[in-house]
Amino acid sequence: MLKIENLHARIEEKEILKGLSLTIGEGEVHAIMGPNGSGKSTLASVLAGREDYEVTEGTVTFNSKDLLDMAAEERAREGLFLAFQYPVEIPGVSNMNFLKAAVGEIRKHRGLEALTAKEFLQLVKEKSQLVELDGQLANRAVNEGFSGGEKKRNEIFQMAMLDPSLCVLDETDSGLDIDALRIVSEGVNAMRDGKRSFVVITHYQRLLDHIVPDFVHVLYKGKIVKSGTKELALELEEKGYDWLKETEDAK
Amino acid sequence: MSIVAEIKPTNTFSFKPNKHSVADFPMPTTRVESWKYTRVGAIDTTWKQAERNANPTTLENAIRIENGFITLPSTSIAGIQLTLGKDLSAAQQETILSLLSKENRTDVFDAISENASNDLVLIEVEKGKLVEEVLAIELGNSSNLCMSAPYVFIVSKENSVAKITVDFKGESEQSFHLVNVYAHVEAYAQLEIHQLQNTSKNECILLRESISQAEKSVFKITTVTASGTWVRNELNIRIEGQHCETFLSGAYFPKQDQLIDNHTFVDHQVANCYSNEIYKGVLFDNGKGVFNGKVYVHIDAQKTNAYQSNANIMMSDNANMFTKPELEIYADDVKCSHGSTTGQFNEEALFYLRARGLSEESAKRLLVSAFTSDVMNRISIPSWKEYVLATLIQNEIITE
């Protein structure tokens, strides 16, 4: 599904990713944890194709295609979805019109027929229930005036609408209260179908109580320094990142 | 310098005493404040005074102004009386003179218009009539290199309601529209004017609109300039009666080397009135935009509530926008606000849309359409709004 090899990336002159390698198979859920500034969000941005970041070395293969060679929109059409840590408010663009355009582009790319207005509305209804998103929100401008929780639910709603094969969740738990966290997690879990893969980036273990990962990786100073199963997350929760930092810095 | 090679005086205003002489007025230069960013030199070519087309187009439902000459629609609209210059009664001539006398400005273009005017039409909305049908006006020049100078006079009589659309079609290869519109909205009346300018083929426009409002009247106007080589819209609104509402809005999209200039003036002469102004620009290539929004609140115009906003997005490093809000407030109990912004696209929003599969081009067009949506939403005629949006889609400015 996704194979990252020796990835180096920088923003302006600052190198953030320093040789990151990771392989994600079909249907797997990988959690990426790490202290602040370790490069978690940079990884999400590089995968999604944000142009501020420059990849200086390494390769990323997505469904046996060169991901780094694609523009952001091509990656989305190929089935990669990034749920933003900070979803952008876009006044004046209605959620519905925007989604209609996005779904249209993605279906076209996949060689599927365009949805009729009725089919589209049916899909909206079905998927918005998944994250308990009020029908009113779907009609408003993209994220405008949404609470933090509504923004994140909107991300998962969009994810469900676009039916990606790889979902990258960038600190989707940040800013969520307990209820929103439950709703968002249930939305994600409902999309786990054994084929779709997930990369869940988070600072805290809490989210992983709800979205149980197959693998947990710790990112530190731009590299994966430790990998394990979900128990690793619990260990990190208990001990914090300091013991890992110390071991790594001692090397 | 003279705009027109030779003016052969016409008799459109034969009933007007003391016509101005073109020779008495200089051409405005960029040293004149109101013409600082708009060079008249650009339109100072050898235009020929327009002549009547031998076979002018008659439209079924619209006033057709061709080469400055006016042809009334073949069907009439109940509640609206249309009168051509040659058919004016003495009372109607008086009405026109009184409308003209309200405008304080007199400059070379007024003198040229007055002397070279091809034709005029008087539109009277009957007292107390709610006119549901929209009165359409279509302007086109069918001869190249001509200057057309029509006048449109509108009187919305007491307690009437009417909507008018004005469509600059852009039919000639190169020509100059010098158009004057004078309107008076009587007490309790409501008038809306919705305009589209899409003169891509080197047509230039100087549109001068002079509006006055009596008490408790409502006046709304939208002006969308989808394209235009050299366009200057001057909109002067005098609020003469209390408890009036005024909404003025515009959107402009200069591309290539086009110039689009909007000069607006809202003159709050009396108390208790509300005005709301939104102009938005998206500037491409070497496009140039000018916005000058003057709001004048007289000393007696207490409780005035005036709002003005002008926002612009630069799509190119070579585009230029000159914007100037100009508020002069002499009353001490008013609420007046203005805002002006000029900037680039929100890169984050662009990336967000692309990360959902939209191409850069369609993401940009979606953002442009969102940016100008508050202006478009003021177009209260659904079919006209659709037409304006279709024009913008065709000009590759917004997406479907």
Image (tube, coloured by chain):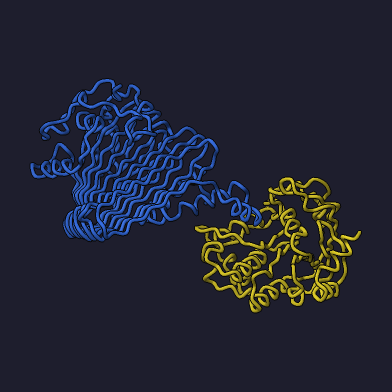
Chain colours: A yellow, B blue
Residue positioned 23% across, 41% down in the render: B152
**Residue A122: percent from the left, percent from the top?**
59, 69
Is residue B292 something that shows in the picture?
A: yes
**Residue A68: percent from the left, percent from the top?**
77, 48
Q: Residue furthest right?
A: A251
Q: On the rendered image, what quadrant is the N terminus of chain B found in?
A: top left
In the picture shown, does residue B126 fall above or below B182?
Answer: below
Is residue B61 something that shows in the picture?
A: no
> How many marks on residues?
0
Residue positioned 39% across, 53% down in the render: B383
Task: Say left or right for A17 vs A110.
Answer: right
Task: Say left or right for B28 vs A19.
Answer: left
- In which image quadrant can residue A204 be found? bottom right
**Residue B103: percent from the left, percent from the top?**
20, 41
**Depth check, front residue: B342 or A221:** A221
In the picture shown, does residue B382 fall above or below A227?
Answer: above
Residue positioned 73% across, 58% down in the render: A44
In the picture shown, does residue B140 fall above or below A48?
Answer: above
Residue positioned 75% across, 55% down in the render: A47
**Residue A231: percent from the left, percent from the top?**
85, 75
Task: Say left or right for B17 vs A140.
Answer: left
Task: Say left or right for A47 vs B31.
Answer: right
